[in-house]
Amino acid sequence: MRILPLLLLLAAPAAAQEFAVLRPQSLVEAPVLRLGDVFDGAGPRAAQPIGASPAPGRRLVLEATQLAALARAHGLAWRPLSGYDRAVVERPGRPVTAEEIAATLRPELLRLGMAAEAELDCGPLLPPMVPPGSPPRLAAEAVAFDPATGRFAATLTVLAEGMPVQHQRLAGRAIPTLPAVIATRRLASGEVAGPGDLRATRLRADRLRPGLAERPEQVLGQQLHRPVAADQPIPLADLGPPALVEKNALVTMVLESPGISLSAQGRALEAAPRGGLVPVMNLASRAVVEGQVIGPGRVRIAPGAAPLRGP
């Protein structure tokens, strides 16, 4: 009978504590880390601040000794089961985009002599992180620019609600761009380019080879001799007038001279545009002669044209 009161006496100090369970992983959005982010069952102490949350997009690891100290300091009945116990606290974040950074740098670089059409290359960049849903306020400070080489340097200042001010040093180059025409979709060989197939843009000069189309009118209505992938520039050498006669297509052979007009059916042995020369086989005689394309499916044969090969 004396054992029960002794057990109750030993349990009395623990009853004053909160029995907590470790949260091995947790996700927090607030800038302040609270006891309830690390321990479940912390009771009214759960809202107690215990330090700063990780920076947006980062994580904080609390090892067993740190966790035990936290539990003791805040009256939680918790002890690590081993030295491997730990809590990982992560905070979501979203990166400041390269476009946002470029939009901040561009006005300052233009003021220092950068060409308006230049593209900014910041090189390998670990973008600063900000809390999701908190629009960042960016500023470029201590901006330097060398118009001769295009190289620049600046300090990017990042402000956003729920995080301390960040300063990041940037260095890169302003690269000249040239006008170009790119395909809005994959264009197959033999297709004739229409307005919806093309988009005028500017591309980095160091990534372009000579002989590319620079204006849509250079491509519109032209036939492709080779396929072009979507979002790729179009070489002028791969373009030509659209074929009015296709290879192996049936055509009307027309022979005209003063006072006479004859026609016969033939088969084109090659494709050709308007005005182009094409070998045609006369289906009646099987002779092959050369004619000039004068319209869709129509080939003019010159009077007295010698056969390219006989029947």
Image (cartoon, rainbow, N blue to C red):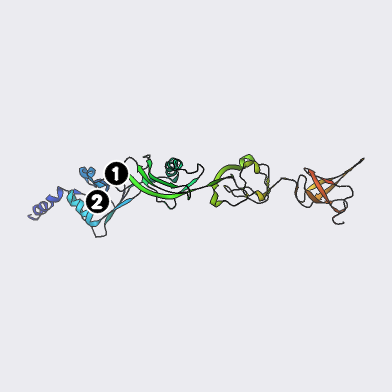
Q: Can residue 95 be seen in this view?
A: no
Q: Residues within 10 Å of mark 1 (few under 14, many from 20)?
A: some
**Residue lying farthest to the right in this orientation:** 259
Disc number for residue 31:
1
Q: Tell me if label 1 and label 2 are in contact, CB under 8 Å.
A: no
Q: Which residue is disc 2 drawn over?
A: 21
Disc number for residue 248:
none
Which quarter of the rendering shows the C terminus?
bottom right
Q: What element carries label 2?
A: strand
User: Label 2 sits on what residue type?
Assistant: Val
Q: Which of 210 and 300 is in front in this view?
A: 210
Q: Which of 235 and 193 is in front in this view?
A: 235
Q: Residue at x 58, y 42 (%)?
A: 200
Q: How crowded is mark 2: few (under 14 residues within 10 Å), some or many (20 or more)?
A: some
Q: Position of residue 109 (x, y in %)?
A: 44, 43
Q: Is mark 1 on a helix, strand or loop?
A: loop
Q: Residue at x 50, y 45 (%)?
A: 118
